[in-house]
Image (cartoon, grey):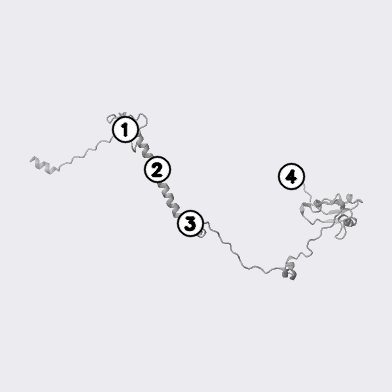
Amino acid sequence: MRAGKGKMRNWRCIQRRGPCIVYNEDNGIIKAFRNIPGTTLLNVSKLNILKLAPGGHVGRFCIWTESAFRKLDELCGTWRKAASLKSTYNLPMHKMLNTDRSRILKSPEIQSALRAPRKKVHRRVLRKNPLKNPRIMLTLNPYAKTMRPNTILLQAKNHKIRMDKAAAALEAKSDQKGVQGKKPVVGNKEKKAVGDKKLKKPVVGKKAAGTKKPAAEKKPTEKKPISEEKKAAA
């Protein structure tokens, strides 16, 4: 049974692959094996890589007939003879006769041609920015020691000149308007009379109760002792 949505697309059942039978001539071999589930029949002149290695997994069990196996030399050729049924086709040959790489590298023929190993380690030096590091700047430009304070003094001098010009322009502008150091009154803003004050409206409701001043507390009267009263009566 297939997992997933394939069941709704009429792909419910899955079949595992069985042996692959390769033949040259069909002398009743198709009818003999077509009813066995999982078997695949291939003609030797129409070989298919998807049938020989389904899913990219090499190693399927293949059964070759004798006539099919003999026809392979005519189809693919050999390492000494080209194919007769195909034009200019030979079997691919190995690029390396000996694939043992470690044995090749350790062979005396290659070791004698190699140079001696370089065991000295070259460390990279971190380059510093001369614009941020004054010591590096002095090594590149010794005049930077004199040039830097000169530029600071020149900037301070130019700043002072700009401030003096701005102060002189402001003073000349205030002299033209007649009042020095004060801005002119804009609009119909007049000073109000000292005696004119707005009358406050009487407060009504809860606000009035909240705004009333508490009544002054009465001090209790001190009573004289009884003995002193009798003496006064006598």
The 10 Å Cα crowd at callout 4, few under 14, some 14 to 19, many 20 or more, is few
Instruction: Select label 2 or label 1 by which is in front.
Output: 2
230 vs 82, nearest the viewer: 82
Q: Quadrant of the C terminus?
A: top left
Could you tell me if the residues under marks 3 and 2 are in contact, i.e. CB atoms within 8 Å?
A: no
* Disc 2 secondary structure class: helix
Q: Residue at x 42, y 52 (%)?
A: 153
- In the rendered image, which residue does mark 3 sit on? 144
- In the rendered image, which residue does mark 1 sit on? 209
State which tag comes first along the sequence, 3 or 1.
3
Q: Position of residue 201 (x, y in %)?
A: 32, 28
State which tag comes first along the sequence, 2 or 1.
2
Residue 183 visible in rendering: no
Q: Residue at x 89, y 51 (%)?
A: 29
Could you tell me if the residues under marks 4 and 2 are in contact, i.e. CB atoms within 8 Å?
A: no
- In the rendered image, which residue does mark 2 sit on? 165
